[in-house]
Amino acid sequence: SGILCLTAKSTMLKPIRACLRCGRCVEACPMGLVPTVLEPLVRARQYKRFEEEGGMNCIECGSCTYMCPANRPLTQGCRDGKASVTAMRRKAAAK
Ligand code: SF4
Ligand code: SF4
């Protein structure tokens, strides 16, 4: 891995809007997940529910984010959720 340092202009970041409930992210997910459910769970720090909804099976392919017309950070949410769950598991195992 590496670190990319880009300006906001060069990344062409678009404003994040409210979910339109269009279902494109669900259709795009190769793992059969529901990204539009997973991302809010991570934001609400509901990691147990994130696990129950299969969030740990996310392969971080980016398809959901690519397809989202509302520019929601769906893949980023899953990545954050997986990292938090993994950290919690490690902490529990170390006790
Ligand atoms: S990034 Fe994860 S949730 Fe999104 S489409 Fe890929 S596997 Fe599914
Ligand atoms: S693709 Fe985006 S706007 Fe459509 S349901 Fe998924 S999160 Fe919502």
Image (cartoon, rainbow, N blue to C red):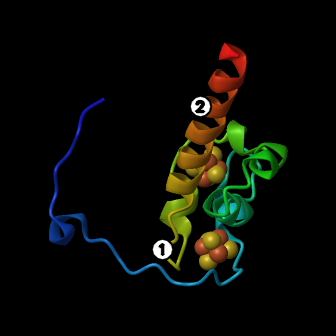
The disc placed on residue 71 is 1
Query: In x, y percent, where is residue 9?
Result: 17, 72
**Could you tell me if the residues under marks 1 and 2 are in contact, i.e. CB atoms within 8 Å?**
no
Amino acid type assigned to the residue bearing label 1 in the image: Asn
Rendered view: 59 above or below 35: above
Q: Residue at x 35, y 77 (%)?
A: 14
- Say what secondary structure mark 2 lies in: helix
Q: Residue at x 26, y 71 (%)?
A: 12
Residue 59 shows in this picture: no
Amino acid type assigned to the residue bearing label 2 in the image: Ala
Point out the quarter of the image occupied by ligand 2: bottom right
Q: Which residue is mark 2?
A: 87
Q: Earlier in the sequence, mark 1 or mark 2?
A: 1
Query: In x, y percent, where is residue 83?
Result: 56, 38
**Observer-nearest of 59 and 76:** 76
Residue 79 shows in this picture: yes
Q: Is mark 1 within 8 Å of ligand 2?
A: no
Q: In the drawing, does residue 19 fall left or right of residue 12? A: right
Q: CA distance from mark 1 to mark 2?
A: 28 Å
Q: In the drawing, does residue 50 fall left or right of residue 58? A: right
